[in-house]
Image: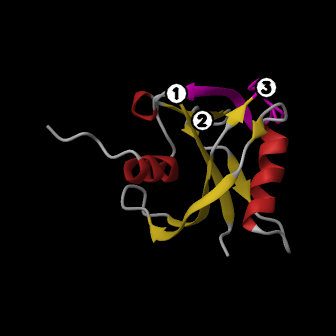
Amino acid sequence: MAKSSKLVAVRRGKVLLVRRRADGLWMFPGGRKRPRETDKECLKREIKEELPKLKLGRLQLWKELKARNKRSGRKMNDAIFIAKDAKGRLEIGDARELDRADWQKPRAVRLTATSRYICDRLFPKERD
């Protein structure tokens, strides 16, 4: 099982991202698992904590990332879920950790290394 779970939700060419208060980097919502928690339970709990007004449709596991990030050198162990539908107000639930949530074009913001890795695989750059 993964050590953390992340949510990828797409709407009109933009993805749902949250910004970390500590360093101003954007990332996919989600977080670390607790003991005896499944990957999906972890994601649902984290979303409820981070974005309490967000309502998610069906969640589908896209991939379990178990690799070393070539950009940062960090080990990744994440379950990445894709939401078929996500709606509601983007109100921050944990203001100590996050200071903003928004639908963003992922190439237009500074992402964490893991979120950049996910974006590069899910949304490859268009080739000329």
Q: Is residue 128 left or right of residue 34?
A: left
Location of mark 2 (residue): 17
Secondary structure beneath dot 2 equals strand
Amino acid tagged 2: Leu
Location of mark 1 (residue): 104
- Of 105 and 24, nearer the camera is 105
Location of mark 3 (residue): 91
Region of the chain picked out in magenta, as a range: 88-103
Amino acid tagged 3: Glu
Cα gap from disc 2 to disc 3, whole angstroms = 12 Å
Amino acid tagged 1: Gln
| Label 1 vs 3, first from the N-terminus | 3
Asked if marks 1 and 2 touch (Cβ < 8 Å), the reply is: yes
- Of 100 and 128, nearer the camera is 128
- Badge 3: few (under 14), some or many (20 or more) residues near its Cα, within 10 Å? some
Picture layout, residue 54 above or below residue 82: above
| Label 1 vs 2, first from the N-terminus | 2
Residue at 78% in and 34% down: 54
In which image quadrant can residue 90 be found?
Answer: top right
Picture layout, residue 4 above or below residue 18: below
- Whether residue 107 is in magenta: the answer is no
Q: Is residue 49 left or right of residue 109?
A: right
Where does the image place residue 37, in percent across and percent down from the top left? 83, 69
- Whether residue 98 is in magenta: the answer is yes
Residue at 84% in and 35% down: 52
- Badge 1: few (under 14), some or many (20 or more) residues near its Cα, within 10 Å? some
